[in-house]
Amino acid sequence: MSDRASSRLDTSLSTYIENMSSHLNQDRDGLSKLITQIGNSLDHNEAEKISQLEDIVRSIRDEYFIQRANHLRQYVGLEDQAPEERLKAVAKALVNQKSTPDLLTIPEIAAVFTAHPTFALSDNVYALLAERASNPQTHIPTLKTHRRSGAPTLAHEQSLALAAILRGRDALDDLTLALLKEMESRWPDTKTTENIDPSPVILASWVGFDTDGRNDIGWWDTIRIRLELKQTQLERLETGLKNIGLNESALAMRIRRAIEAVRTQHAACPSGKDATPEDINSFAQVLISHREQALLDAKELIPLFHDASHTLNTEQALTLRVLRAGFMSHGLGIAHIHTRLNAAQIYNVARTRLGLTDDPALPSRRRVLLARIDDALSNLTPKDVNFGSLLVEPASATRLMMTMAQILKHIDSGSPIRFLIAETESGYTLLATLWLARLFGIKDHQIEISPLFETESALENGEVILEEAFHSPHWRDYLRANGRLSLQFGYSDSGRYVGQLAATNLVERLRMRTLALLKEHDLEDVSLTLFDTHGESIGRGAHPFSLRQRLDYFSPARTRLALQKAGIGCRVETAFQGGDGYTLFGTKEIAASTIATLAEHIAHPPQKLNDPIYERPDFAADFFSTIALDMSALVDDPGYAALLSAFGPSLIDKTGSRPSARQSDAATVTRITHPSQLRAIPNNAILQQLGWWANVLHGLGNAAQRHPETFEQLVNSSPRFREAMDFARKALAHSDLEVLRATIRQLDPGTWLDRASLATDEEARQHFLTISRGLENLRFWTSAPAMFRRIQTDHIALRAAWPDAPHMESHEKLLHGIRFALIDRLWVLSTNIPYFGPRNNLTREAITNLILCLDIPRALRLLDDLFPITALNITNYDFGELGNASDADGFAREHTEIFQPLKRYFDLLREVGIAIMHANQAFG
């Protein structure tokens, strides 16, 4: 704890906390003693002590914030070398790597900007984090809070993504400039390179285009955001031309006309939840009538680029080539786009339009489905799509495919669109998607159909899924026409169901099997796109120590060497997700360093495979399957659902435009009966806040003790196995069994009965008895202790096999102790809520249950209605007679003594969560 904070604290409280923090890892009962001492201190001079506790939390929060900024700086390699020097060095390596300059036009790696509920900090705090990472001398002010004032909207997520993308594009320009100079040095004959637009690294986005699991994105929202990407791309080119004196060139004038047209189209695009037929009709007329003026294909500008270059000096001409390369490699958008939906939505379309009612999950019926979808592809007659079709179409998959058709017809016909399909469980899914695309006139080269392999079933059976599609001549024809097979691998859901370590092993195995399938079906002329969707947290599969290691982890040497040997081209794609991910493009320096790291990954491929893990396939198979089986069993343990459900999303603020779980404003507690009812990111965030990263750690002890000698050997000798254990090291540094034990005790009614029996006054005794009764009714205690013993048994085995594994640092454990003390205080305060008779099924017990589950905001909303702070003002009315019977003061005392302290304690509890997040260095 900093001296600045300690100097402001009550001596007894600050001294005790500081002393206890140094003993938390030595004293098994230290956490319990700490919680009790803080609680006792809050009983006296409460207002003063809570202020002191707030100072303690902010002080620790800021210490971890600075550590997090330092980590971000190291993560992208800013301390290694200046980004501009790295870009020059990697450009030289890339040019020397290629036999001909045209090979530099093939994108080999992409950064994909994703969103979802990951925006846990306020925008100014994210900005401060990036600034501090860029410049360690940046002053860190002591802010009252690092939390957001509210969840971001989709539009706000898009604006944040756009800002990150623009910094990424600026860094790409710097890389392109260095590439052009190196090309000129290696190939002095300008005729060899003058028409070459190098683009080994590109950017893409799915913000506003990902409709999986949400119904709040109208198709007009998707089109509006696509127009914004187009407008930004054109405006960026216009600015670049102006900077080199080409403002009056034919190229600049053409761009200005296009910008004006796109702005007109964008202004006419509907917004809001609903759009009337009149709105859509008007928009359709404007979009179509302005499409030629707005440009339909970036290639239309190539002659104008050539004409503009004739009037420029050497330096200006080089800058123009940089602008052209960035523009042509991204088409009529500041980034490429990825759409996404769920496979079930594809099945719905095939059922309604083709009458295919069989369940693709049933192997006995799948052969029939595959034959019938093949017939449908053979006898397909394309249909014309207009905006009226979109307006009346009820099926979400059909609407999304129609939207893509309209984007390709009216906004950008030259840039292919990625079509990601979540929960792909059959080759039938891929063929049905191809049928739907062709039905609406989308050409094979315009759509990149990509299955998402994320569930345990999909990862286990991915080879079968692909082979089912490969058997269709239509799918093989599609792949040859498109030129690439796109695959997406998810690390969020797979990690939480089978464990992160096992998930990555399954992904690597599936990649190798895909390579074998391409050879088997004579598709070795088809390139691969391997898109890894993850986040910046190990809970979502990102390597904890550096971006370079993260890329190596997703694209292991074994796979890269096998592809290289087979002569199959491969593009690696990696996600940068939401708040945490965008900080990797948070400043000019960080963005340049990130782009340099991506380029270095493809510029320096592995030369040979020297890893003993591949010489022990028996060990690897047994080790990772043990983790997967144990994690699967934990996920199905009722105690695990109870643990996630007890406090659930109440531990974290709402962090995105997509919900964490279904909620309501009623007084009913939202109970989670299985982890599948939570989205992956909140699931992981809750585990982090509970101080036990089960989705990374569970099963590891059992797996390690099965082969302890081999485990110890490979931890030290195998680069691939050591990369996996890096995840465990990170998780163990932020997990503590005593913290998890404290949660189980907190939820145990017996704990509160014991406190009641020791209470020295009747009022305190009744408080504890009330809490015990509430917890008894919630019944978390029935299954959570057995689940804890399951985790404890595995952890004992892990510590035995890996005695020098990390432990949670004392200040982080201290934060957990403070939060438990705050929960105690919240629960005791809740017993002071005045009794009221049932009102529309709303009871005092229901309010208490909400508070026991820490759903304080919802409880306070209901309490505000039940106990208004002031009565209705009637001083201006004459009711015809005297009256002074009512209490015009309302319930001011209850608000001052109960409700306002409830909010203050809860706000501090959430700030503790932010501090823990900073310690973990990522969210979810």
Image: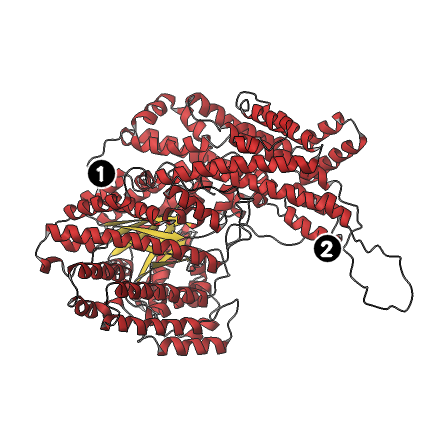
Which residue lies most toward the left here? 189
Q: Which mark is residue 513?
A: none
Q: Nearer the viewer, residue 181 or 754?
A: 181
Q: Please provide percent x and percent y for residue 740.
A: 56, 31
Residue picked out by circle 2: 865
Instruction: Decide if residue 143 is on the left or right side of residue 801.
Output: right
Q: Please provide percent x and percent y for residue 126.
A: 45, 47
Amino acid at the residue labelled 1: Pro
Quadrant of residue 775 within the rendered picture: top right
Q: Please provide percent x and percent y for residue 93.
A: 18, 44
Instruction: Decide if residue 230 is on the left or right side of residue 218.
Output: left
Count neighbours of disc 2 (C-alpha within 10 A) and say few if under 14, some if 14 to 19, many if 20 or more. few
Disc 1, SS: loop
Q: Please provide percent x and percent y for residue 700.
A: 43, 30
Disc 2, SS: helix
Residue picked out by circle 1: 606
Q: Nearer the viewer, residue 91 or 660?
A: 91
Amino acid at the residue labelled 2: Asp
Residue at point 43%, 58% (across, down): 159
Residue 215 position (above or below residue 721): below
Instruction: Decide if residue 95 is on the left or right side of residue 22.
Output: left
Quadrant of residue 204 within the rendered picture: bottom left
Of the numbered discs 1 and 2, the one sitting upstream in the chain is 1
| Distance of label 1 from label 2 (alpha carbons) | 65 Å
